[in-house]
Amino acid sequence: MSLLLLIKRKMQSLQEKAAEWSGVAQEDAFAIDETNLYLKLGHQTFVDLSTEFYNRVFADDQTWFQSIFANSRKEDAIQNQYEFFIQRMGGPPLYSQRKGHPALIGRHRPFPVTREAAERWLQHMEKALDSVSKIDSDSKTRMFNFFRHTAFFLVAGNEMTNQQQTGGDNVQRK
Ligand code: HEM
């Protein structure tokens, strides 16, 4: 099998797991692409969303979750996130201009992206979405479905890379 085909199959299986575990079908997750949310909501809305999100994360009384972010500066984390969101939701490619390809699975590799962590991340994000009044309910639904699906895509990616690290090559054997 060619390497390209192998990568394509692996991505497909991660997407399937993401849909199953998140409960969000792929087409709902990518409903963010049917409308330009960046033009609709404006730059500052994304800055506000990421600020609200990370204010909650860094103040989380559940230390197991907060400590995942212990090596990050809040200001950097906010900028990384809103630049990615802006680029992904129809705005200029600010993230890639500064940091290159998002490669989210690879960039989350140092962190324990478990199902519990995904649920906690999503709780903070849902509250952050609710706190930014410029985000109307249709946009909120689209964004939250994308976040939920992506969070579990990262969980699936994390499990895959852990299997590889521990030498369990059952991905290939099955
Ligand atoms: C599932 C639970 C998740 C956990 C535990 C997690 C954890 C983290 C941590 C610890 C960082 C480093 C913070 C920084 O310095 O930027 C990070 C960065 C980032 N995360 Fe997540 N994340 C999760 C889900 C997501 C989701 C769902 C998205 C996108 C929809 C996302 C997008 C990003 C981006 C774009 C960065 C910046 C990466 C970089 O430039 O290095 N994350 N995440």
Image: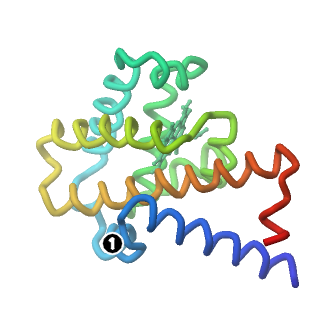
The one nearer the camera, 138 or 156, is 156
Q: Residues within 10 Å of mark 1 (few under 14, many from 20)?
A: some
Q: Residue at 55%, 17% (x, y): give it.
A: 70
* Residue ID at (28%, 72%): 35
Which residue does the numbered mark 1 point to in the structure image?
A: 28
Q: Quadrant of residue 27?
A: bottom left
Q: Nearer the viewer, residue 152 or 167?
A: 167
Task: Say whether residue 38 is visible.
Answer: no
Task: Indicate the position of residue 111 as horizontal and vertical percent values.
Answer: 62, 34
Q: Is residue 5 left or right of residue 105?
A: right
Residue 96 percent coordinates (x, y): 60, 52
Q: Quadrant of the N terminus?
A: bottom right
Q: Is residue 26 above or below residue 118?
A: below
Q: Secondary structure at mark 1?
A: helix
Residue at image position (61%, 43%) is 98
Looking at the image, residue 97 sits to the left or right of residue 21; the answer is right
Going by the numbered disc 1, the residue's amino acid type is Asp
In this view, the residue in front, 98 or 27, is: 27
Residue 103 in view of the camera: yes
Residue 83 or 157: which is nearer the viewer? 157
Horizontally, is 172 left or right of 19 in the view? right
Decide: is 145 above or below 61.
below
Q: Position of residue 61 (x, y in %)?
A: 35, 15
